[in-house]
């Protein structure tokens, strides 16, 4: 068991006053047998009025509305989680076998998928390594190169991407080979920004893999949300009125609890 | 029986124009409003034909509502092998975000537009179900209004069902699902929508508010209407004329300016009714259409009263072989398209096009359906002073509340092009009044 304290803070500063601001956050860790929440609080500024709910994937949502003028928006999610073996027992929802908006195959996904030779008598876990090796051979990590709208196909065509793109391509290839896979957002120890990895389903259990680091996501992964792809689990979404430039700052700290 | 109407044709058309019976259309990115051509000769449906249509439509829409409830919850129909799961999860209209949500009173499709054609042997066939935002009811409403004024004798001499109750049917459906007795609104994307005329007309007739996205606001998972001086009033039901993907920028298409942010949260918590419900597209997908008679049997334990046009799913190997062997006599439809787009007649295709479609069916079989071309009856229309025959269909409107009602009227559309089978108004067709006879 690993006990981690996390503190995640996002500050958006607007160059002018904005109003009529709606937001939707998925910034609260998700409870499961692999992850127990010991402590969790979330504060939102300048106005801490928020509503709790759950989306259809079971992710916790915080939503709210700030009607009046404001020129900054800040949320801070903090707490302590206990991490156990990253295995989540759950009956398969067949949805995760089918392609989704951001993982839709065109030419590149079938091409890379067909080029991968999976071991026939090896385990799914071995095959996941084979897939991840192929994904890593086709993508170079380049910070900030893609956007939240980039699809798996586009990232492959570019040959570059961030953790989101590694996860999308990996998911698309898994689904192509009939392995159910889903997208996960969260935090990892030792990195100053949010991260994305995947879960794959085998024998009634979801296992986790981190294609960006090309390793199983076993230790120090705090999970926030999952879905078919990024669009189901964006951590922070908002719309507002006003003509303003925005500056985004993210502060993330994950430390082992003594 | 309707000769007086033909005499009054010019008067009727002038009034139509004055009332602004229009239809917006985008061509090459430019928005144009056109007069929706009206033909004075009504389509007449006998009382006995109607009795069968009505019973069949009620049965069909009830089954479709049960299907939607099942798909977003237990999925019995998939588990029991009636419908392959691929048809659900690969459907563009399936919304995973709606899993587990049962809307107020369990109704998904409050207003259904079912497209029918009558074959030359008199049999009625269902061509398409429209369970998202079926439009067009306002046209026969206003046409009847005007023809009654132009020739009152016609309607005292003929026993035709009055069709002026459509707005009260809609209103009753809104009242029935209204949450906490809130305001009732029709949500329009605005005047550059092809059916804006209808939105404003229905709001006026049903006595509900016509709202734009900006008028609605979600706070604490409740929907409010911002009235004068920003006074907020709780909204209980939204008859929305904005499609699912634009309805809530935080749940769906994030670039949408037409939507109401976080409306999905209020809806998921059961704090507002949305008609029609979100995610209905999974049930009116052209691929799912094939399974509707099976749904009737599965959920209701009855045989379907109304027939589907004979349909083949290349997804099934046997059907695929049949379709590829008989391409020239069939009509091929792209399941993802609507409004008469993506419809191809084998008989009109040259060798190149046939090879192309053959290839597409082989590689992406789930995307296509093939149907036999029904030789449907031609209806008389006036072209100048001359009577000519044209293909037509009928969109029947079915309203579901505590009970399911079929509006005794409907939108009869006809093609103006003598060789065309496609009657969609977006493809330049016209419309007629539809008379359902009392005896």
Image (spheres, coloured by chain):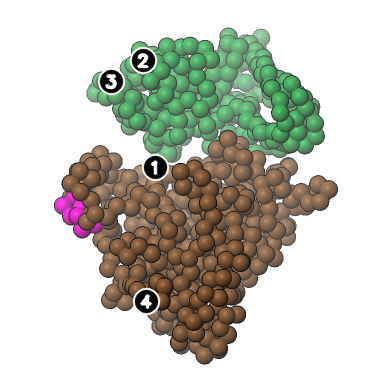
Query: Which residue shows up at 70% across the image and 45% down it?
Result: B214
Q: What residue occupies the far front of the structure in this picture? A: B385
> Of helix, strand and loop, which one carries label 3?
loop
Q: Chain of mark 2?
A: A
> Of helix, strand and loop, which one carries label 1?
loop
Q: Is residue A85 above or below residue B104?
A: above
Q: What residue occupies the far bottom of the structure in this picture? A: B157
Q: Which mark lies nearer to you, 1 or 4?
A: 4
Q: Position of residue A133 (x, y in %)?
A: 35, 14
> Of helix, strand and loop, which one carries label 2?
helix
Q: Chain of mark 1?
A: B
Look at chain B in the picture and name its colour.
brown
Q: Position of residue A43 (x, y in %)?
A: 74, 26
Q: Position of residue B42 (x, y in %)?
A: 45, 77
Which numbered tag is attached to residue B387? 4
- Part of the protein shown in magenta: B323-330
């Amino acid at each position: 068991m690993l006990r981690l304290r996390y503190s995640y803070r996002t500050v958006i500063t607007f160059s002018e006053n904005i109003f009529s601001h709606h937001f939707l956050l998925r910034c609260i860790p998700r409870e499961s047998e692999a992850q127990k929440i010991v402590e969790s609080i979330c504060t939102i500024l300048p106005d801490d009025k928020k509503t709790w709910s759950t989306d259809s994937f079971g992710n916790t949502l915080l939503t709210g509305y700030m009607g009046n003028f404001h020129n900054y928006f800040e949320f801070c999610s903090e707490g302590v989680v206990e991490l156990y073996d990253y295995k989540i027992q759950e009956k398969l929802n067949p949805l995760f076998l089918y392609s989704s908006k951001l993982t839709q195959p065109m030419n590149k996904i079938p091409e890379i998928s067909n080029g991968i030779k999976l071991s026939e008598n090896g385990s799914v876990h071995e095959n996941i390594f084979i897939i991840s090796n192929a994904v890593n051979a086709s993508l170079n990590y380049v910070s900030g190169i893609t956007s939240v709208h980039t699809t798996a196909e586009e990232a492959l065509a570019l040959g570059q991407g961030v953790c989101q793109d590694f996860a999308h391509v990996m998911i698309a290839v898994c689904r192509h080979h009939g392995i159910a896979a889903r997208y996960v957002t969260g935090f990892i120890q030792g990195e100053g920004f949010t991260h994305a990895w995947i879960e794959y389903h085998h024998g009634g259990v979801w296992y986790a893999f981190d294609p960006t680091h090309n390793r199983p996501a076993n230790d120090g992964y705090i999970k926030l949300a999952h879905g078919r792809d990024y669009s189901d689990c964006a951590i922070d979404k908002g719309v507002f009125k006003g003509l303003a430039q925005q500056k985004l700052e993210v502060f993330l700290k994950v430390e082992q609890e003594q | 029986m309707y000769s007086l109407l033909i005499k009054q044709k010019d008067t009727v058309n002038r009034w139509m124009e004055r009332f602004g019976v229009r239809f917006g259309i985008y061509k090459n990115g430019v928005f144009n409003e056109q007069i929706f051509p009206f033909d004075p000769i009504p389509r007449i449906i006998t009382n006995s034909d109607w009795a069968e249509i009505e019973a069949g439509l009620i049965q069909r829409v009830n089954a479709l509502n049960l299907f939607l409830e099942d798909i977003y919850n237990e999925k019995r129909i998939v588990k029991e092998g009636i419908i392959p799961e691929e048809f659900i999860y690969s459907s563009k209209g399936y919304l995973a975000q709606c899993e587990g949500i049962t809307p107020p009173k369990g109704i998904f499709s409050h207003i259904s537009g079912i497209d029918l054609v009558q074959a030359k042997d008199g049999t009625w066939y269902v061509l398409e179900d429209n369970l998202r935002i079926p439009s067009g009811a306002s046209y026969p409403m206003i046409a009847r209004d005007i023809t009654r004024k132009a020739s009152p004798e016609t309607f005292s001499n003929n026993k035709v069902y009055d069709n002026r109750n459509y707005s009260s049917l809609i209103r009753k459906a809104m009242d029935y699902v209204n949450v906490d007795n809130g305001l009732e609104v029709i949500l329009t994307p605005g005047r550059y929508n092809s059916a804006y005329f209808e939105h404003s007309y229905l709001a006026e007739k049903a006595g509900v508010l016509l709202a734009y996205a900006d008028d609605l606001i979600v706070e604490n998972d409740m929907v409010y209407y911002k009235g004068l001086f920003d006074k907020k009033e709780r909204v209980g039901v939204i008859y929305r004329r904005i499609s699912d993907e634009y309805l809530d920028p935080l749940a769906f298409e994030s670039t949408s300016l037409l939507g109401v942010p976080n409306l999905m949260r209020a809806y998921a918590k059961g704090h507002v009714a949305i008609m029609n419900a979100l995610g209905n597209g999974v049930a009116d997908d052209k691929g799912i259409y094939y399974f509707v008679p099976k749904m009737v049997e599965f959920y209701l334990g009855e045989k379907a009263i109304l027939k589907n046009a004979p349909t083949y799913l290349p997804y099934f190997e046997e059907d695929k072989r049949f379709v590829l062997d008989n391409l020239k006599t069939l009509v091929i439809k792209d399941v993802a398209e609507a409004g008469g787009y993506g419809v191809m007649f084998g008989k009109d295709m040259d060798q190149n096009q046939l090879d192309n479609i053959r290839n597409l069916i082989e590689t992406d079989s789930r995307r296509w359906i093939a149907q036999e071309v029904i030789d449907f009856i031609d209806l008389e229309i006036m072209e100048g002073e001359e009577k000519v025959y044209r293909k037509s269909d009928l969109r029947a409107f079915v309203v579901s509340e505590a009970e399911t009602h079929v509006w005794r009227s409907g939108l009869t559309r006809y093609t103006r092009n003598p060789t065309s089978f496609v009657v969609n108004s977006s493809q330049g067709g016209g419309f007629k009044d539809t008379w359902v006879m009392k005896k």
